[in-house]
Image (cartoon, rainbow, N blue to C red):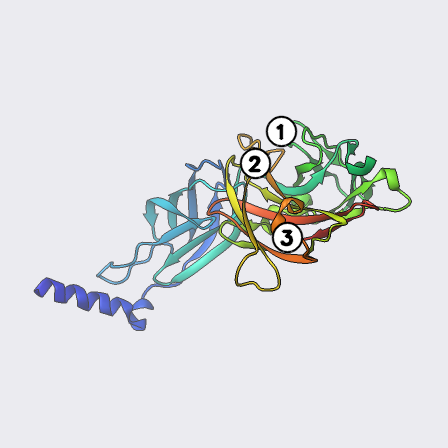
Amino acid sequence: MRYRSIAAIVVFLCGLPAFAQIAPPPVIQNVTPSSGSISGGTLVTLTGIALSPSCGGYMIGCEPVVRIGGVEAAIVERASNRLVVIAPPNSHGRADVEITTPGGSYRLAGAFSYGGAGFRRLLLPVYIDGEAHGAELSRWVTELFGFHRAAGVARVTGDPDTSAGTVAGRIAFRPALETARPGQGRFLYVADEDAEAVRLNLRVRDVSREADNLGTELPVIAAEQAFAAGEEIPLVNVPTQEQYRQKVRIYDLDGEYGRTVTVRIYGDDLSTPIATRSVTTSQAAIETDYPAYPGQGELDLNLLPELAGLDSVNIVIDTPDAGQWWAFASITNNTTQLITTVTP
């Protein structure tokens, strides 16, 4: 009983503001190396201030907690101003490095990159190399244009390991990009140092009806713009009239095979879904540092009998507990082949 009383007093003291203030707030000044494998296991050294403080003589509740990309990293070496941790497995792309001690929390945004380092990964939601044939004798193309507004040379490429993708300064250009999956998503890579100077525009259009349709612009999505695992992706006011073809297109930016999302479809009443479906994404080239394709799945709204007679619906996509996600709805007019998009 005596020992329980002592432990209770110490725990109580650690909860008091005066006791907590013994530890100074942590600051991360450097992360080395700044990149590692998506499978985890990289030894990462954090240097800074008060990374492993002492809470007086008790040393209770003073173990620092380090997270990379929101996932806790095991600590293998500790010193006041230096920690060595093991990077956990995580998604492709940039990850925040965060430390929490009794003195507070500190986050260094985008300080560690998973997968290939030095490049920003961009999702082209639809990409066609040449033409693709569609319904009503339509012939679809995508037009990808870029503008490099700085004076130096930039790198824009589909695979930094095999193609330099160099672009001169102060010019408009068309990135050279091939695809084995026409009409589906494709990744494009821009060197980190060039990301702010390069602007991209992606359009999809039916060239069989050029007089009626000049194309529809699609967003180019950076990995950091994607939805995190467990987040809901909302698509509001998606038209469902009979004169349109409607598809919901879902992307897993990490590309793991077999991950499944739940799609809930509502009318004006958001309390109870009209229809619920599961969509499993396709496989992508996740074994490379610079994958070419995302995992991707589609839901054809025209095939859902529950939506018959409705003018529009609201859609909520529940993502699983892993990955980075994005989605949009494409609505194609059966007569003009004009595409309207609904994005989050």
Amino acid type, label 1: Asp
Q: Residue under circle 2?
A: 116
Q: Residue under circle 3?
A: 307
Q: How far apart are marks 1 and 2 (CA)?
A: 9 Å
Q: In this view, does 59 lie above or below 142?
A: below
Task: Please state if 120 lies on the left or on the right of 146 as rendered.
Answer: left
Return the x and y of residue 321 as percentages of the image width and height: 46, 47
Q: In the structure shown, which secondary structural element does the residue marked by tag 2 occupy?
A: loop
Q: Which of 78 and 315 is in front in this view?
A: 315
Return the x and y of residue 180 as percentages of the image width and height: 68, 28
Q: In which quarter of the image is the N terminus?
A: bottom left
Q: Residue at x 75, y 42 (%)?
A: 152
Q: In which quarter of the image is the C terminus?
A: bottom right
Q: Residue at x 85, y 38 (%)?
A: 207
Residue sitting farthest toward the right: 211
Q: Which residue is drawn at 44% across and 40% down?
A: 89
Q: Is residue 107 above or below residue 179?
A: below
Query: Is residue 174 at least partly visible in the picture?
Result: no
Q: Residue under circle 1?
A: 161
- Contact between labelled residues 2 and 1, with CB atoms less than 8 Å apart: yes
Q: Nearer the viewer, mark 3 or mark 1?
A: 3
Task: Please state if 26 lies on the left or on the right of 268 as rendered.
Answer: left
Residue 160 falls in image quadrant: top right
Return the x and y of residue 103 as percentages of the image width and height: 37, 63
